[in-house]
Image: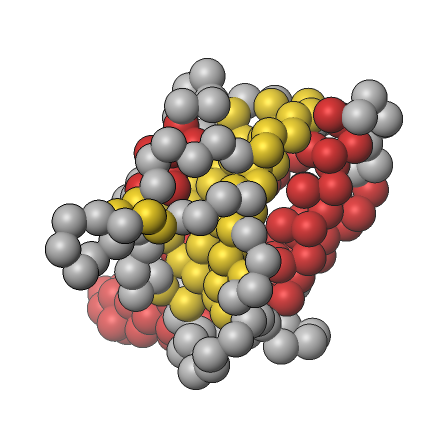
């Protein structure tokens, strides 16, 4: 009798584990279904340019490229939050027909300090969104492309995300981080409530 129960458990337990694992996978897919897409291509030239203005490699990099306004970028190094405005031509005439990246461009730089809570949560939340990026990138001509990175190897993106999506929350997060850096540069106390609220919403969605 004991042997029969043991044998039955040996068969049933792995099946239960498999079912639970499959449910977990489906739950993760559902959580990130309206989130980011894997990066199809991301040039490192902007990263290389902005690194000259940073004391160390960033834990978080977000670059936004609108169709009709300058490229802007967020970088987080420790507690230091940087917001860059690349208000110059990104490409200049090169050899032959192909332009080259304008590595001599000088960005506008805004800087603030974030709380320990943001410095801890931001890389974790974005890291998971990049890890589980699965959304098909929509087709479009005009709009804003956002690139999210937690390391040079990890990248995900979105393009002008639709209202009510997880990707829209991430785009809104970029805006709030930019506002934080600009406020800090002016000497104003940055408001962190909106940033923390978005992070909490993404973490518990």
Q: Position of residue 74 (x, y in %)?
A: 55, 40
Left of 200 or right of it: where is 171? left
Query: Is residue 124 in sight in this rendering?
Result: no
Left of 188 or right of it: where is 147? left
In the image, what residue occupies the spot 46% across and 17% down? 55
On the rendered image, what quadrant is the N terminus found in? bottom left
Q: Where is residue 203 in the image (x, y as percent from the top left)?
A: 63, 53
- The residue most toward the left is 96
In the image, what residue occupies the spot 72% across and 47% down? 176
Q: Is residue 19 above or below residue 54?
A: below
Left of 136 or right of it: where is 163? right
Q: Nearer the viewer, residue 110 or 96?
A: 96
Q: Where is residue 37 in the image (x, y as percent from the top left)?
A: 41, 67
User: Quarter-wise, where is residue 205 in the image?
Assistant: bottom right
- The residue most toward the bottom is 139
- The residue most toward the top is 55
Colour mapping: secondary structure
Q: Is residue 87 above or below residue 144?
A: above
In the image, what residue occupies the spot 61% across and 23% down? 79
Q: How many labels does the image show?
A: 0
Q: Which of 94 and 126 is in front in this view?
A: 94
Q: Nearer the viewer, residue 205 or 186?
A: 186
User: Quarter-wise, where is residue 185 in the image?
Assistant: top right
Q: Is residue 105 above or below residue 69?
A: above
Q: Where is residue 107 in the image (x, y as percent from the top left)?
A: 52, 34
In the image, what residue occupies the spot 69% across and 51% down? 175
Query: Is residue 34 in sight in this rendering?
Result: yes
Left of 194 or right of it: where is 164? left
């Amino acid at each position: 009798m004991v042997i029969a129960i043991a044998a039955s458990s040996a068969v049933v337990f792995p099946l239960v584990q498999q079912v639970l694992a499959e449910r977990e996978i489906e739950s993760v897919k559902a959580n990130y279904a309206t989130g980011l897409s894997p990066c199809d291509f991301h040039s490192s030239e902007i990263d290389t340019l902005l690194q000259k203005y940073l004391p160390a490699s960033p834990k978080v990099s977000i670059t936004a490229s609108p169709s009709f306004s300058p490229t802007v970028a967020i970088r987080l190094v420790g507690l230091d939050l940087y917001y860059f405005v690349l208000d110059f031509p990104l490409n200049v005439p090169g050899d032959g027909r192909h332009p080259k990246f304008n590595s001599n461009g000088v960005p506008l730089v805004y800087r603030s300090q974030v709380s320990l809570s943001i410095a801890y949560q931001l890389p974790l939340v974005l890291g998971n969104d990049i890890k589980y990026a699965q959304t098909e990138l929509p087709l479009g001509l005009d709009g804003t492309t956002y690139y999210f990175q937690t390391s040079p190897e990890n990248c995900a993106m979105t393009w002008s995300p639709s209202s009510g999506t997880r990707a829209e929350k991430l785009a809104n997060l970029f805006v709030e981080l930019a506002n934080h850096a600009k406020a800090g540069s002016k000497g104003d106390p940055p408001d962190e409530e909106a940033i923390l609220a978005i992070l909490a919403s993404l973490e518990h969605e």
